[in-house]
Image (cartoon, helix red, strand yellow):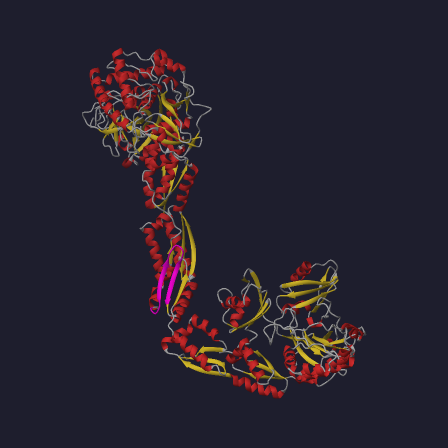
Amino acid sequence: MSIESQEDRTVEVLGVIDEVEDELLSLYFENKRRSGGGCLESVNRKGSRALLLFEKAEDAARVLSRRPHVLHTAELTVRKPACKDPCRLLLCGVNPSTSQELVELYVENMMGIDEEQYTLYPSSGRDLVLVHFHQAFNKDFQKLSTKISNKSLDGAHIVLEQIDQTDSVTVENLPPSITADTLSLYLENKRSGQIKEVTMMTEGLARVSFQDFDSVERVINQTHKLRETELTIRPYFSFLQSEESSFSPQTSPLTSVNGTSDGDTVDTQHEDSVSPAQTGSLPAASTSDDSPPLLQSDPEPQSHQLPPLVSKAAEAQGGVQDLKSRPELLSRRISVPDPVNLALFQLSPLPQSLQQTYPAFSIQIRDEGICVSGPDQQGLEQLENTVLEFLGDVAQVHIPFDPEKARFLAKQEVKDRVLQTLRDGGLPCVYSVSDCMVMLASLSFSLVSEACSTLKDLLRDFSIPVDGEYECVLYSQEWNDFLPSLGLCTAQVSERGGQINVLTLRGLEDEKKSKMVKFLSTPIKKEAVITMKSGMLKYIQTHHHQLLADMHYVSIVPLETPDMCGLRIHGSPGPCQMAEQVLQDVVSSTVTRTITVNKPGVARFLLEEGEGASILREMQARFQVYIDMVEVHWKPLETEDIFEAAWKMMLNHNFPRRSSDVFLQSSPDLAHADQNSNNLSAPDSGLLEEAKKLFSAIDEPVDSGLSGPTTPTDMEEEDLCTAQEPMALSADIWVEEKTPMLTEGGGHDATALGASTLDEVAELSLAIQYSMESTKSFATEEEELQKALEMSMKITEHDGSNDVDIASLPAAGARHDKSAHESLQDDIQSANTATIYVFAGYNSDLIRVDIALSKKVNLRQHVEKLEHRSLRSISEYHRKCLNLIKRKHAVDVTIQGTTATVTGFKDFVTGAMSDMKLLLRRIATVTSDSDVLSTVQWVWHDPAASGTTTPYPPEVIVFMENACKMKQKKMDILLNNQPHIINFEKMQEYNVASGKSVTISRKMLSSGDLQDRDYSLSNLPETFRLNEDSDEFQDVKKDFYASIQEYHNKIRIVKVEKLMNGLLYNQYKLKKASMNQCVNGPDVERTLYHGTSENSVKEICVHGFNRSFCGKNATVYGQGVYFAVNSALSIQDQYSPPNADGHKFVFVAKVLTGDFTNGRHSMKTAPLKETSEIPLRYDSVADKTGNPSLFVIFNDTQAYPEYLITCQKIPR
């Protein structure tokens, strides 16, 4: 073992509060993780200061370098302890009356220095003189000390002492109003060092204490000027201060020969006088107030005062008066800065002997010296000379020991035991340990020699053999905890192993040996837990599994609970500690990195089993890392139907209860018109009224595939349809075989409508077509109605038994649209963000994983685009559908103009594109809000005012109408932030908060109230050619080419014309309004293609699509008008034959396909719905019900030719 200096292993701790016990202080500085320290040999504490002696110098160095140290909320200051000052020596025993010049000559002669090389500082009593060298003094101190002790000065015996460094300076000549903070800031700016305390002593004088001792030399060697005033900086030593106050300014230094001397003699009889009642104490451990003790003979500071002696004559005369008549006592202080000499003086019989010899004098040990007081000057000088002679005769010897024994003797408990043994043997002495050298001091050389022999004889060492099975215990923490309990003993495992080398004191060998053998033979089990992150645990299990397997001598169990994660080690102390240390090293050497990837769908890509998971496994194996995905979140959408989910989200939207600007008001004229509108015969009218009552009770709907849709029942204006064709205009129209009839609820005759001639012609034309389509007699209709009536009665009875009062419905809690939206956005964000933690053995592996993962993710990003004119303006409902597509497929969808861009991983984008196309088809075919508001009005009846109705706001009307079309039985809605339930079966609005209900109604608006919002149509059809640069042309072109399939590079568009036929358009809108009330699904309208010949173009533009021409091209699926979903079918020559110029003609038509089924060749009209209890027909037929490619309609008003595309084949 290398010999390490005790100075390098010692650390001084300042600022220790009383609440911190010695044991806690020791444990803290032995904890390597918290303080950086290690095993301690001794802890010497005095008040708020403590001296720590470490076994290893490297532990002390770590403690000094690691700051701050906080214990019990108090910040501790650590520094190296003071050492002997290389620039200052102290002359003790100087006669106070000795002149200044004589002292200077004495110093120069004895030390061989010049006047420019030093400065003298006398103490306040002038019996001590501090010699301050301008450069470090490098002469042999022992020889110089012997030389000075043999040469008296002015009759006084002089003793030369070494002193410890000081950490404080005095600052003199401070300008007025300078505060401690100002001075501290000035010195810190001078880079003098970290300041511990600034004390303003008197006007113009301050004391400054630093954290380290080297700062004193730096600040003294600099020049200082504050506020244009030169400052004087001197080292501060407590023994140079006056006894009355430690804050008195230091005396001015004695000047050299060529300097200026004050020439004054100090009045020692006045300044050195002390009261006999004063008490002395052991000397401080350092010349500086804050320095640690180097030697302490007693653990507690004691008061050592020799009682003053009063002469027996005076005592016989007795009385206070005699004492008062005594002359004033004189005093003198003999400074003894060396604590060893002071301790020996206290141990020797000299103090008692002097008291007996000089009974009138008092001898006290106080501060760092000996105070003598008495009635005359001569006695004081005699006592002082005697004490100085004693101190000069003190003998010291330096004994070398090996490091282990030196550290053993430095322990406080060992020192106390050894010194007590020596004193019991008549050998009063003290010793201190520095490095591997023990300095032993006694009253004489003979006593020192005898004490040296005795000290060496007290040390005993022996060895204890240890079996291999117990040797591992010697490296456990239990063994380290056991050794201090032995006391007066040290033990170390031999370098070769197999035995313990023990060092103790004489007479303790058997006791220590028996305790060690007993401890080693007792089986001990230990358990340790190493906590770590779950990813770290997985990394160790994956890439250090062989290391874990090799630790078979202990039990290692992984811990993975919500409260703790790590490894639990159980076994014998030695193996357990070794395994713990090895695993701790593995944990500390493992590096980690947080990698955040922001790409659409990256969370789903990495979490789902597939290519992403395969990439992660590949990187873990290739780079020997573990990738923790604990912060990556994605889960599939609970429902696959985004449209149903979006509708449920719409239920959370808050609507106004009233509207100050109602879209349409109910008109008294309409009611009046209703009274005159029924021209049916009495029997027919009664039958129809009975049928209306019948249908009002029916509540078994056709299943639409949504969440329990139901046909509304209690609607006053419910549509009634014939067996041949469902019909619902602005009024409920029932048609006899040849006579158009309008029923109450909004129907009017020609005189009451007050509409334009064009509107009248449109209604008349539509009614005539219904009349032409009637193939059954009125008697047949009565039979069907009678069957429906009987069936309805059964349904009504069944429904009545399950009727539930509105008030008993469970209260629908208020939903918060904002929170639902934020939750969806959070899910989308989580899918697009992956925060992963990577654990590896080397930083380079972390960087490689980061680069490789980013590269692989970026390479797999895919982009597809969709273009559709409907994207320019989409509703709130469709925006929610769009967000649900993002959420469902983990993609990003952005819309700019008419282009939707889908970004993400290829498989996810492919799935999203399917839903996007379905969404676009729905957007294109959905009934616009303006169309809904122009045909339907929902109102609520004020219970306080009979007959008064209040329309709902437009957005509520649209919302309720859509719910009604979806056959919802009930609907939750927020009106003015209050939850309501709309019951379409009972036609009631129920306020959940108040428990009140009001009746609601649905009204059809007459054609006179309809306003065309698309075109300004005239009475005659018109066409105009679209500009090829217009958005409208580009939209038609893109849709045409999007479905042209294999003809994409074979057909070019010559021109696109827009048709404007007011008659056809109004017929179409009336038909659409009617179908909107009966169709189960949301796709009432579709944009389809119809190819035709040049000769038929004008006919279609003027009169629309005519069934009378069926069979000209095809009647495979029925004898009606055919329309294709894809333009590829319409441009075939059989459907659109080219004219003489090679031009082909294809119409882009709006077609009301509604509810459809499979068509057959024999069909002349759409068949009846088989699943319907009411005799209703389908609206159209198709080649197939699943993803049809063509549709057939049997009502010419169900299609409106919107555009005519003229195209031609591209010649090869």
Which of the 4 image quarters holds residue 740?
Answer: top left
Which of the 4 image quarters holds residue 758?
Answer: top left
Rendered view: 790 above or below 160? above
Residue 561 among magenta residues: yes
Residue 667: x percent and y percent? Answer: 41, 16
Q: Can residue 275 be seen here?
A: yes
Q: For this view, does 39 lie left or right of residue 171?
A: left
Total labels drawn: 0
Residue 844 among magenta residues: no
Rendered view: 890 above or below 189? above
Residue 672: x percent and y percent? Answer: 37, 13
Q: For this view, does 478 lie left or right of residue 125?
A: left
Quadrant containing the C terminus in the rendered view: top left
Comparing 681 with 1127, the one in front is: 681
Residue 890: x percent and y percent? Answer: 36, 44
Comparing 707 with 1130, the one in front is: 707
Rendered view: 1201 above or below 1044? above
Residue furthest bottom in the image: 446
Q: Can residue 1138 be seen here?
A: no
Residue 193: x percent and y percent? Answer: 63, 65
Q: Which residues are magenta?
A: 552-570
* Dominant secondary structure (helix, strand or loop) of the stretch shown in magenta: strand
Comparing 651 with 734, the one in front is: 651
Comparing 672 with 31, the one in front is: 31
Which of the 4 image quarters holds residue 211?
Answer: bottom right
